[in-house]
Amino acid sequence: MAFGLVSLEKRMKDNIKNYSPDQLLDIGMLKEYLETACQLSGICFLLVDRHGEDVVRVGEFDGFRPDVAEAPGDKIRVSGRTVAYLYTCVSGQETDIQKQFVKDMARQLTAMAESTYANMETAIYVDELEKRLEKEQYQVKHGEKKDALTGALNSTYFESRANVIDRSDVVPVAVICANINDWKYVNDKYGDEESDRLIKVVAEILKKEAKNEYVIGRCGGDFFHVLIPMVEDGEAEDYCKRVQDACNAFEDEKIAPSVACGYVFKTNVEQSVMNLVSDAEYEMFNNKFEIKNAPGYRERLEKK
């Protein structure tokens, strides 16, 4: 995950809202099972999702349309949330045996859905734990100087490098802030894996377009800072333009990298690089406003 790993308990409580019955139940097998149950018991079955849309319909319901708000059937609940409703009908008076059979059926469907959900979410959680472990091992290997996701300097080591530059009385120094535009949109639409990939793609572009002496750090979730010691006239502007052009030229089915950049200069040895970061961020936000309001930006982001 990009910004920390939540507990499995919280994950399962939150993520169930993203699941539909066809993800939690083997619908083909369930239909065969209910057809057999209908033949043996004389009960017709209708399973609908939380919005009342048909999932499985076995037997005749004579135009019946479920009303999940006012007249819900037996609830199929997983992790405290209703994921489906089971409706039934019989010809004639329903017997006690048939009533008990329906209750048992609802419990069985609930158990099947809960088991599937637990297995799926646990597998994803274990995978994320393994990725976290790999990141931690990477950080140990590299002396905790680099960000595990991108290979750029982490925020702590970036600041220490900035302090070294300050102590060396080097001027001029370009202080650049680069921020990924609409990272949250990608995270919300595609999830952590794709939003992490977006961060890695941007980091690779920042590194590819940089010279060896550039200092590049990932200093926040979707924020990067870049220092150019002994910067030449036009060099910072040219670097930012190359990075933005490379992002815009990147073609992908899902992500559309876009970066807002702002830069300022340390021209006096008495100035502190880190104190200038906020000024660079201010310039970056001005650039972000221009980019996000430019024609075609939204269409590229949303892949229209």
Image (cartoon, rainbow, N blue to C red):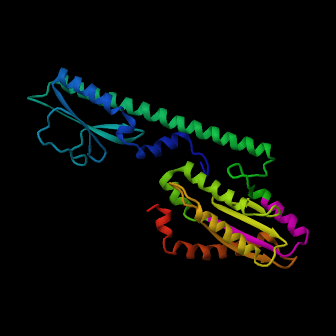
Q: Is residue 76 left or right of residue 65?
A: right
Say whether residue 251 is visible: yes
- Percent position (x, y) of residue 179? 63, 65
Q: Residue at x 56, y 42 (%)?
A: 7
Residues rendered magenta in the picture: 158-179
Identify the residue at the far right of this view.
Answer: 168
**Nearer to me, 180 or 80:** 180
- Percent position (x, y) of residue 273? 80, 70
Q: Residue 188, relative to residue 44: is it above or below?
A: below
Q: Residue at x 60, y 45 (%)?
A: 5
Q: Residue 229, relative to residue 12: is it above or below?
A: below
**Nearer to me, 252 or 282:** 252
Q: Is residue 200 left or right of residue 124?
A: right
Q: Is residue 189 magenta?
A: no
- Percent position (x, y) of residue 271? 83, 76
Identify the residue at the far left of this view.
Answer: 92
Q: Residue at x 74, y 58 (%)?
A: 155
Say whether residue 100 is visible: no
Question: Number of marks in the image?
Answer: 0
Toward which corner of the image does residue 73 lie, by quadrant?
top left
**Nearer to me, 88 or 171:** 171
Q: Is residue 154 left or right of residue 13?
A: right
**Nearer to me, 90 or 248:** 248
Q: Residue at x 15, y 42 (%)?
A: 64
Q: Which image quarter holds the C terminus?
A: bottom left
Q: Is residue 160 magenta?
A: yes
Toward which corner of the image does residue 77 lie, by quadrant?
top left
- Percent position (x, y) of residue 195? 57, 54
Q: Is residue 293 left or right of residue 223?
A: left
Q: Residue 287, relative to residue 157: is it above or below?
A: below
